[in-house]
Image (cartoon, rainbow, N blue to C red):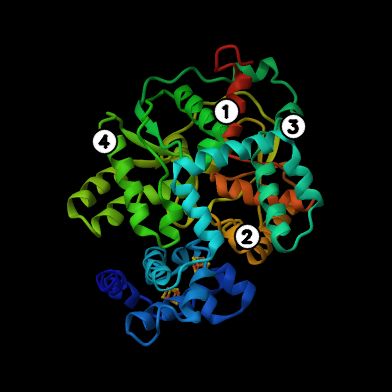
């Protein structure tokens, strides 16, 4: 036990240099959703960094309520990193501080149960199977409508709304007019082969959003990429890292590094922002405890690319499909915008689709309150932040909201449903895929 404590103390001690970058200017405060909602300095990035420093210097016990509660209330959205003029690596620090925090005091039972289930296939797969069955019954939509918004039933209500929001929706496609012959003439020819890629199918993504993975494969192939299957892969470990369970996250990272190692590919594609951000940090995560694994992790991380960057990054234009008249609001996932600093490719991808009207979304760069399992474990604050996001989507006049992360799709979709709004939350790739289907790019698809 003493050895474990020493190792954890080291986890934060190693961060002294990173912590020292904060000059306490406070520029990050207005960007922080918990600070703007709660108005408490301790719930701001600067306040939390101050608490980390106090633990590091031995002035505060990591089991103290202040350290535990204010760190726990952080969304991990990393909006503070984007605006910080000193380049404070807040996300990295938060994960190490949480490792120390959970060692000092176990997190809530709900959090432990959720992370434990996601990390164990023998529990996760039956849970997801049952969830899909429940989803197919149509009952989650009714539960989301009728259950009271308090206590345990309130959690069931939110979980049901999230599950209902993850269901495939055809209404947004079926309401669109069919493509005209003029649109077909605008189709671009099949591009030349571009290279070989594989993608992380993910855990929740593959179980509840399998259609997005299928669409990703089709869209990549339609753009000249050969997609190879990598069967030996698993969860990216992002949720465990955010929850301070860095050893679990490292085991998951290493499995993926090994799994993709001999695939003979140019790129490892991520279609879930949280997974992409985590995979881009494998080198550092693994290198903290094993230099050799760190080097292999770094080589892996360098090949990770978000699917929108691969298709519509600098100098790249996606193949043009058929028209799909739809007013879309784009909400960038925090782990794409703030953690990966990807901004531009998702919007370019959407506007490359004939008929798409991209409408401005107020406060689009603010977190949706989903933040992995935060929406469930912090139902009230997550709901307030998510409610504001849903209200902004409604006010934008959009017919659909696009966001490239399963957690964000479920949170925004659920909050819209709870407000009685029919606006679906879609992955940008789903929309491009539908445009391609209408253009007849897939055999027998028109
Ligand atoms: S984290 Fe950055 S922006 Fe925030 S107080 Fe510190 S230096 Fe300023
Ligand atoms: S990660 Fe998000 S919630 Fe946490 S301190 Fe930074 S801005 Fe605030």
Q: Residue 171 — which label?
A: 3
Local secondary structure at mark 2: loop
Question: Quarter of the image containing the C terminus?
Answer: top right
Picture quadrant where residue 431 is located = top right
Q: Residue at x 47, y 37 (%)?
A: 312
Distance, label 4 to label 2, CA atoms, is 40 Å
Local secondary structure at mark 1: helix
Looking at this view, is 436 or 294 the one in front?
294
Mark 4 close to ligand 2, CB under 8 Å? no
Labels 2 and 1: the sequence-earlier one: 2
Labels 4 and 1: the sequence-earlier one: 4
Q: Residue 433 — which label?
A: 1
Mark 3 close to ligand 2, CB under 8 Å? no
Distance, label 3 to label 4, CA atoms, is 41 Å
How far from the left and from the top, in percent, is residue 248? 36, 54
Can residue 349 be seen from the camera position used here? no
Instruction: Between label 4 and label 1, give the one nearer the viewer.
Output: 4
Residue 332 located left or right of residue 385: left
Can residue 62 be seen from the camera position used here? yes
Q: Are marks 2 and 1 in contact (CB under 8 Å)?
A: no
Q: Which residue is mark 4?
A: 261
Q: Residue 363 — which label?
A: 2
Tell me if mark 3 has few (under 14), some (14-19) or many (20+) residues whose alpha carbon lies within 10 angstroms of its own. Answer: few
Tell me if mark 4 has few (under 14), some (14-19) or many (20+) residues whose alpha carbon lies within 10 angstroms of its own. Answer: some
């Amino acid at each position: 036990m003493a050895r474990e404590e020493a190792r954890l103390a080291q986890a934060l001690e190693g961060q002294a240099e990173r912590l020292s970058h904060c000059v306490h200017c406070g520029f990050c405060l207005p960007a922080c959703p918990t600070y703007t909602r709660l108005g408490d300095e301790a719930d701001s990035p600067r306040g939390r960094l101050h608490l980390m420093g106090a633990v590091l210097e031995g002035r505060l016990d990591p089991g103290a309520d202040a350290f535990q509660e204010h760190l726990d209330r952080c969304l991990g959205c990393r909006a503070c990193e984007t605006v910080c003029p000193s380049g404070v690596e807040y996300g990295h620090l938060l994960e190490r501080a949480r490792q120390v925090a959970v060692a000092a005091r176990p997190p809530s039972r709900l959090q432990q149960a959720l992370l434990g289930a996601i990390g164990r296939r023998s529990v996760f797969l039956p849970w997801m199977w049952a969830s899909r069955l429940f989803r197919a019954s149509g009952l989650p939509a009714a539960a989301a409508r009728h259950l009271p918004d308090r206590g345990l039933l309130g959690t069931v209500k939110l979980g049901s709304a999230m599950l209902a929001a993850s269901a495939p929706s055809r209404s947004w496609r079926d309401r669109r007019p069919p493509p005209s012959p003029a649109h077909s003439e605008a189709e671009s020819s099949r591009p030349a082969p571009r290279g070989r890629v594989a993608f992380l199918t993910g855990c929740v993504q593959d179980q509840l959003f399998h259609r997005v993975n299928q669409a990703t494969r089709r869209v990549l192939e339609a753009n000249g990429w050969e997609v190879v299957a990598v069967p030996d892969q698993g969860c990216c470990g992002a949720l465990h890292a955010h929850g301070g369970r860095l050893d679990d996250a490292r085991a998951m990272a290493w499995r993926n590094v090994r799994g993709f190692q001999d695939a003979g590919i140019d790129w490892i594609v991520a279609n879930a922002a949280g997974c992409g951000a985590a995979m881009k940090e494998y080198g550092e995560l693994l290198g903290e405890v094993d230099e050799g694994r760190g080097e292999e992790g770094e080589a892996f991380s360098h090949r990770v690319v978000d699917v929108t960057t691969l298709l519509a990054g600098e100098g790249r234009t996606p193949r043009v499909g058929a028209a799909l008249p739809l007013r879309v609001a784009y909400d960038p996932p925090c782990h794409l915008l703030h953690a990966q600093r990807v901004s531009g490719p998702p919007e370019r991808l959407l506007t490359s689709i004939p008929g798409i009207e991209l409408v401005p979304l107020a406060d689009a760069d603010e977190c949706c309150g989903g933040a992995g399992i935060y929406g469930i474990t912090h139902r009230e604050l997550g709901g307030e932040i998510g409610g504001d996001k849903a209200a902004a989507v409604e006010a934008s006049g959009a017919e659909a909201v696009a966001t490239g992360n399963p957690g964000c799709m479920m949170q925004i979709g659920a909050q819209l449903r709870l407000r009685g709004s029919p606006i679906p939350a879609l992955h940008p790739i789903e929309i491009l895929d539908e445009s391609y289907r209408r253009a007849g790019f897939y055999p027998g698809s028109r």
